[in-house]
Amino acid sequence: MDKVYFATHLASVLTLLAYLVKDILWLRALTILACIAGIIFNYFVASTPLWAVINWNLIFIAINVVQIAVILRERRGVNFTEEERELYQTLFKNFAPFEFMKLLRVGEWKDATKGQLLAVEKQRLDNILLIYNGLLAVEAAGQQIAQLTDGNLIGEMSFVNEGVASATVRVIRPTRYLSWPKAELRHLLKRNPNMRYSMEQVFTGDLIRKLTPRRHADTWQSD
């Protein structure tokens, strides 16, 4: 009987752990283990096995096994370019590789020339931009107030509060950047809560970098 009650608590603990983990693969694996523990409990708890509950647990196991196979296939198929790998290993390491690949698919690599404007103060900004390599000036009321460089984001705050750009961003030297349409990015993150949480961490990290004093240039929220 002690073993029966142990299976009951084990199923509950595994289910709890499944809700706590961020990685969907671990969530599904723990769910399978919880279902197995539940089957053990429902087979021994009564004088006759509770087949209805057992069968439902078997169905849940089958579904999660299939989804795990899909996830593993997706992860094996992830191949990053040199630029993408550098971003993943530095700014986006909280993402699972296949999640970062999904993020890249809705984005577009672009190049900006000296003098080009990437954001205009008090105007709508439809994209979030990530500077991969370059240097940009942040201007407010016609005056330069800060600079942005590799790894900084443009437009993340207006993405969160759905406002307009708080400053103008002008390219100082040729810049390569990654651009995400806000509408598509918002839709992607809405469908993938784990990615939304990871993206919020990226936003927080960028804000911390912007508020940290730098030796050669200050930075600013340019959105």
Image (cartoon, rainbow, N blue to C red):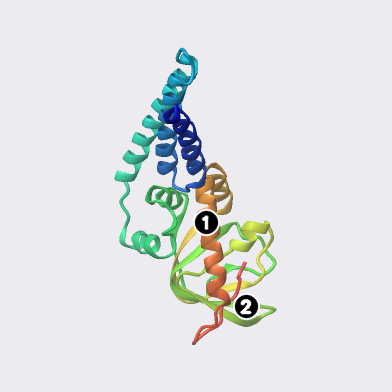
Dividing the image into 4 quarters, which one contains the N terminus? top left
**103 or 90, which lies in front?**
90
Q: State the image coordinates of residue 175 (x, y, percent, origin top left).
A: 44, 71
First in sequence: mark 1 vs mark 2: 2
- The three-letter amino acid code for the residue at tag 1 is Met
Residue extending furthest bottom? Answer: 215
Q: Is residue 39 above or below residue 161?
A: above
Numbered label tally: 2
SS for callout 2: strand
Q: Is residue 114 visible?
A: no
Residue at horizontal 62%, vertical 60%? Answer: 125
Task: Please give the residue where the numbered disc 2 appears in the rendered image.
Answer: 139
Which amino acid type is marked by label 2?
Answer: Glu
Circle 1 is placed at which residue position?
A: 199
Which label was assigned to residue 155?
none
Q: Is residue 40 visible?
A: yes
